[in-house]
Amino acid sequence: MSSSPDQAPLETPSLLGAGEISAYLRRHPNFLIDHPELLEILIPPSAQSGETVVDMQRFMVERLQREVARLNGAHGELVAASRTNMTTQAQVHAAVLALIEAASFEHMIHTVTADFAEMLDVDVVTLCVEANGGPPPRITTSNVYVLPQGTLDKLIGAGREILLRGGCTPMPAIYGPAAELVRSEALVRLRFNSHTPVGLLALGSRQAEKFHPGQGTELLQFLARALERSIRAWLDLPTG
């Protein structure tokens, strides 16, 4: 259908010429840095481009090499983290099964304070309980200690359940003679019920970065909850 004589033909938008584009890019030398996605569609010049032409092919290759190196590094970190998590998960599961298989209360305490260290790949594991007022009594069982009332709130923090720290100076009251070995630790609060003093599961390692604040705590808290239930069951404590 043709247009009437008094109708102006539709104008098509004019396209920028090479000179205008070149001038714009000269005024904005960071354009490709701000829009790196364009590198995926631009056709680079030949590597033998002369002294006055930027070798875009080399620029793109170097950029891709940096991106590949970054992705390879991220992939390696992800694989390492996944393997570490799977190992820790298997260790905690084995520790929980050992709690379930204990034949007596004394056997369970021995499992925690002696066998857990090898199972969880740490150097020392201790159980502590806060004294219910008065001076802490002396305990002769190895790696079991009584702490003054209020110690856990001061150490872990009121309302907090777990503390992970590396490069630390541990308390001899928690680890006894093994304290001088400990360079990082995981401290997990134990709550048996509302009528008994709180307890502590302490894991110490000579590796300064074995435990640190950036780690996940779900598996350690699961282990602590399993230990609480085992102790309540052996001592016939109410759950409330």
Image: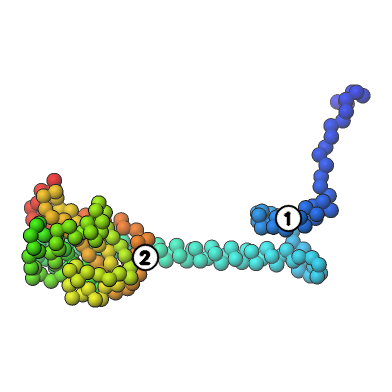
Label count reads 2
Residue holding disc 2: 84
Q: At which x and y percent is residue 102?
A: 13, 63
Residue holding disc 1: 28
Q: Residue at x 25, y 70 (%)?
A: 170
Determine crowd level at label 1: few under 14, some 14-19, many 20+ residues with C-alpha closer than 10 A.
few
Secondary element under disc 1, as helix, strand or loop, is: loop
Q: Is residue 55 left or right of residue 180?
A: right
Q: Is residue 219 above or below residue 145?
A: above
Determine crowd level at label 2: few under 14, some 14-19, many 20+ residues with C-alpha closer than 10 A.
few
Question: What's the CA distance linking mark 2 and mark 1?
Answer: 48 Å
Mark closer to the observer (2, 1): 1
- The colour scheme used to paint the residues is rainbow
Q: At which x and y percent is residue 187?
A: 25, 62
Q: At which x and y percent is residue 73?
A: 51, 66
Q: Is residue 19 above or below residue 90?
A: above
Q: Residue at x 45, y 62 (%)?
A: 78
Q: Residue at x 11, y 53 (%)?
A: 196
Q: Is residue 86 visible?
A: no
Q: Is residue 76 left or right of residue 173?
A: right
Q: Is residue 177 visible?
A: yes
- Name which residue type carries label 1: His
Q: Residue at x 42, y 66 (%)?
A: 80
Q: Earlier in the sequence, mark 2 or mark 1?
A: 1
- Name which residue type carries label 2: Thr
Q: Is residue 30 left or right of residue 218?
A: right
